[in-house]
């Protein structure tokens, strides 16, 4: 039996491996109870995000742009699932210019990674997201509610964007990415990487 986290350049995997033949075995003069039963053995967690690239095109000051990622997850007979997300860094150019993570419109209290807030003013700048779907956080209760991503560059932990305790579920959700730039934003190609972690509720 084994468990742990593995990673490569493009992937991060957390897993638990157990024996599918765990149980009580008997023969003349012996009774053996052996093995570690992984209740999820033989089940499959399916997770997809499309498209793989979110292209905002040409950014114009005071003209917010929203693009959408479509998320599909199915958990078979496993009891629930959780999906977390984070960014590697704020949107940045190779020259070091950045688009700040959104603070939303709320003043003096801005939105945070755990507390979304209204963002509908075209003079509020930055980059953020919102979730829509049956298993999305209820804090995204309005089409104008957004939040910033946690960033691994700042050693911040991924935030939960989908969660369910049900079995045999196939859910679909959308993640809306929004960006708005100020007039003096440096010209360049801004990029970052949004990472997702999908775990069965074992």
Image (cartoon, helix red, strand yellow):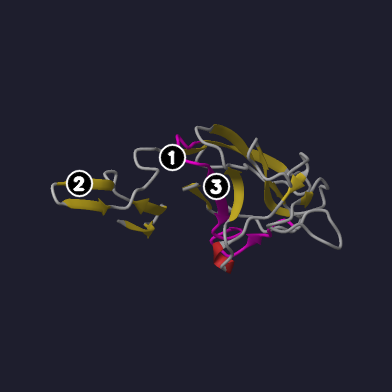
Say if the magenta span includes residue 15.
no
Circle number at residue 26: 2
The part of the image, by quadrant, that contains residue 143 is top right
* Residue 5 shown left or right of residue 27 in the figure: right
Q: Mark 2 Cα within 10 Å, few/some/many (few <14, many 20+)?
A: few
Mark 1, residue position: 45
Q: Mark 1 Cα within 10 Å, few/some/many (few <14, many 20+)?
A: some
Point out the tag, 2 or 3, that comes first from the N-terminus: 2
The part of the image, by quadrant, that contains residue 138 is top right
Circles 2, 3 touching at the beta carbon (< 8 Å) = no
The part of the image, by quadrant, that contains residue 113 is bottom right
* Residue 90 shown left or right of residue 116 in the figure: left
Point out the tag, 2 or 1, that comes first from the N-terminus: 2
| 3D distance between C-alphas at marks 2 and 3 | 42 Å
- When the figure is inspected, residue 90 is found, relative to residue 81, above or below; the finding is below
Q: Nearer the viewer, residue 146 or 20?
A: 20
Say if the magenta span includes residue 101.
yes
Element at label 1: loop
Question: Residue 169, position in %: x, y?
Answer: 53, 33
Mark 3, residue position: 83
Q: Nearer the viewer, residue 194 or 183?
A: 194
| 3D distance between C-alphas at marks 2 and 1 | 34 Å
Which span of residues is magenta-colored? 74-102
Question: Residue 152, position in %: x, y?
Answer: 55, 63
Residue drawn where x is 72% and y is 59% of the image: 112
- When the figure is inspected, residue 202 is found, relative to residue 156, above or below; the finding is above
């Amino acid at each position: 039996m084994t468990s742990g986290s593995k990673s490569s350049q493009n992937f991060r995997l957390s897993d638990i491996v157990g024996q599918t033949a765990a149980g009580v075995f008997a023969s003349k003069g012996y009774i053996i109870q052996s093995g570690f039963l992984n209740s999820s053995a033989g089940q499959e967690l399916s997770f997809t995000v499309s498209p793989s690239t979110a292209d905002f095109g040409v950014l114009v000051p005071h003209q917010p742009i929203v693009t959408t990622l479509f998320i599909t997850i199915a958990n078979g007979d496993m009891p629930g699932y959780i999906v977390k997300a984070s960014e590697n860094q704020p949107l940045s150019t190779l020259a070091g210019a950045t688009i700040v993570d959104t603070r939303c419109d709320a003043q003096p209290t801005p939105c945070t990674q755990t507390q979304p807030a209204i963002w509908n003013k075209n003079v509020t700048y930055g980059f953020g997201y919102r979730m829509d779907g049956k298993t999305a956080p209820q804090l995204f209760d309005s089409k104008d509610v957004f939040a910033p991503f946690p960033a691994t560059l700042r050693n911040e932990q991924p935030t939960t964007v989908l969660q369910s305790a049900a079995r045999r579920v196939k859910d679909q959700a959308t993640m809306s990415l929004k960006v708005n730039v100020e007039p003096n934003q440096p010209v360049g190609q801004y990029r970052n990487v949004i990472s997702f972690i999908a775990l069965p509720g074992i």
